[in-house]
Structures are given as structure tokens and as C-alpha cells.
Image: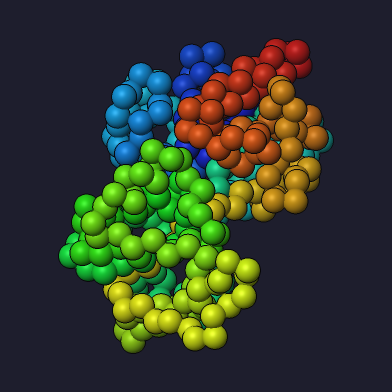
Amino acid sequence: MIYDLIIIGAGPAGITASVYAARKRINFLVISKDIGGQTAWSGDIENYTGYQFVTGADLVTKFEEHMKKYNVPLKEEGVLELKKKGDSISIKTNKGAYETKTAIVASGKYSKELGVPGEKEFKNKGVTYCATCDGPIFAGKDVAVIGGGNAGLDATLQLMKIAKHVHLINITPELTGDKIMQDKVEGAGNVTILNNTRVTEVMGDKMVTGIKIKVYLPAGRENEKEKTLTLQGIFVEIGLMPNSDFAKELDKNKKGEIKINSFNETNVPGIFAAGDVTDIPAKQIIIAAGEGSKALLNAFSFLSRKK
């Protein structure tokens, strides 16, 4: 079978594109390893239009309900290769191969790693990259959140309600996330903020037992003495990398984000992209959803012109 469209990814961009595709009655397929993308990792969401407050998990449930209403066809597979092949596009996954006339890459991003000794050894043994997923496991324990941006602040806001104490470790001189989130974190009685600080090692036995850190003076010089924090959990929230390695033919920027124009077109005719995997400047759930609808409408126009 040659599909009219294959959507890669089922985060806000991919899901929105799929709903629009179903309404246009396109012969399409969604391929994704999971549903919800980064939204599923989010805690409290207060800036999604129509919801004064909603959790990431609840919003993903709403997304899934919308997909089910339109019987969106979904294959839970990981994409390995996206390649233009004559007039069609071939997609290889870990379970099979597919062919389509157009494609929308909405594969989102994945968490950056610290790259320090002990991190890989203790992954899922105290080192985690999702406070929403794994936070409850660390109830009543001492933990560290690495990262002073919105992701780190969001994780801290979730964990300070669960953990005994949270060490918020930030490599820059000041927190960089939204002020309203900073105020909540700074007002918490069980959060210690460590600015100008970086992690140098993750320690443990069978599970994580602590981390080594270095604190920088204002002039940027390291203190001679390395400090050790005893704790049981580490939540790495230092940023994200685009899931774009499988799309080798597409032009990307230095960050690996897929370059698109205002019509969500890539450098390869028939391949569109949307959401956090692209080089759009703002990474927000509502923006990804809007970009998903744009990408679908432009892909539909492309198909209409070909027929």
C-alpha cells in the first residue's frame, strides 16, 4: 500500500495533524513509539488555551480521546529511516517498511544527558529524565534536579510535593525559567537552590547514593574543594535534542533541528515537519499543536496539486 500521508510522531504536533488528516479523509498512518511526547512528561500546565489548569497526563488523555473519536490509525514503532524514493517516500521502522506520497516529521525531542561518570551505570537506578513518570518512586527521599530552566523548575515543583528535600542544581548564575515558577520554587521550604554549580560524577552502589558537584565563584573560577551531596534520586532536566537522526536527507541547523519555511516545507518536496523537531524559535505545547495543523493543511494542498 502507498499511503497519501504518514505522520511520524504522536506528540501535540503529530496528534493535531492526525485529527486534521482524519477530517480531510486522507489515506494516512501515524507511526510513533508513544503517545503524547513531551506533554506526557509535563506536570502542571497553566498556559494551554481553554484550560486554566491541566496536568500533562490529563491533556494527553484528551489528545488520545480525540484520536480515538476519528479512529486514527497508529503503529507503535520506532522510525529508523526516512528517504525520498522517486515520486514517493520510503519509511523504515524497527518492525517494517512503508511507502507514502507525503510525510510529516513531528518526532519531537529527547532528553540530553549530563555526560558524567556514573550517569549511564545508574540510569533507571536512581538517575531519571522524567519527574512526571518517576517522581512518586522517590517519595520521602532526598533528590537532585539538574537544570535551572522551565524543565528543571517544573520537575522541582512536582518533586517538592513528594520528596523530603530537593537540591536544584543550576550551572548558570541565576535560574532562567519563568518568573512565576521561580517564585514558587524559591518560596518552598524543602528546596535548596545551587547556582553556578555543575555535577561532576554520579555515585552509587546498586542504586544512586549521591553526586559530586563543583561550585563556581562569580569570576568563573572553580572552588578547589569538590563537594558531595548524599541523595537517592537524580532528575536530569538540562534540555532536549531533536529526534531527527533518521531524516538524513533533510537540512538541519547546528542543533540538529529540521529547517522549515512558513509552509512547514523541508528541503525535500513532499516532506513536511512540525513541532519541536523543527527550527521554530519557541517550543511550547500550543505552538506544536498549531504547527501540526499547518503542516497537515500544507501537505493536503501538496497532494491536491499532484492529483
How is colour applied across the structure in the image? rainbow
Q: Residue at x 65, y 43 (%)?
A: 91
Q: Is residue 209 left or right of residue 34?
A: left
Observer-nearest of 249 and 53: 53
Image location of residue 130, percent across then percent down = 38, 55
Can see residue 27? no
The quadrant in which the N terminus is found is top right
Q: Is residue 82 left or right of residue 24?
A: right
Image location of residue 163, percent across then percent down = 23, 61
- In which quadrant of the rendered view does residue 135 lie? bottom left
Q: Residue furthest left?
A: 140
The quadrant in which the C terminus is found is top right
Observer-nearest of 207 and 215: 215
Q: Residue at x 70, y 50 (%)?
A: 256
Q: Is residue 137 above or below residue 206?
A: above
Image location of residue 107, percent across then percent down = 56, 42
Q: Is residue 35 above or below residue 81?
A: above
Q: Residue at x 54, y 85 (%)?
A: 224
Q: Is residue 211 left or right of residue 25?
A: left
Q: Is residue 140 above or below residue 275?
A: below
- In which quadrant of the rendered view does residue 137 lie? bottom left
Q: Is residue 33 above or below residue 226?
A: above
Q: Is residue 170 left or right of residue 231?
A: right
Observer-nearest of 224 and 40: 224
Can see residue 147? yes
Image location of residue 122, percent across then percent down = 40, 76
In this rendering, the count of numbered labels is 0
- In which quadrant of the rendered view does residue 49 lie? top left
Q: Residue at x 36, y 24 (%)?
A: 66
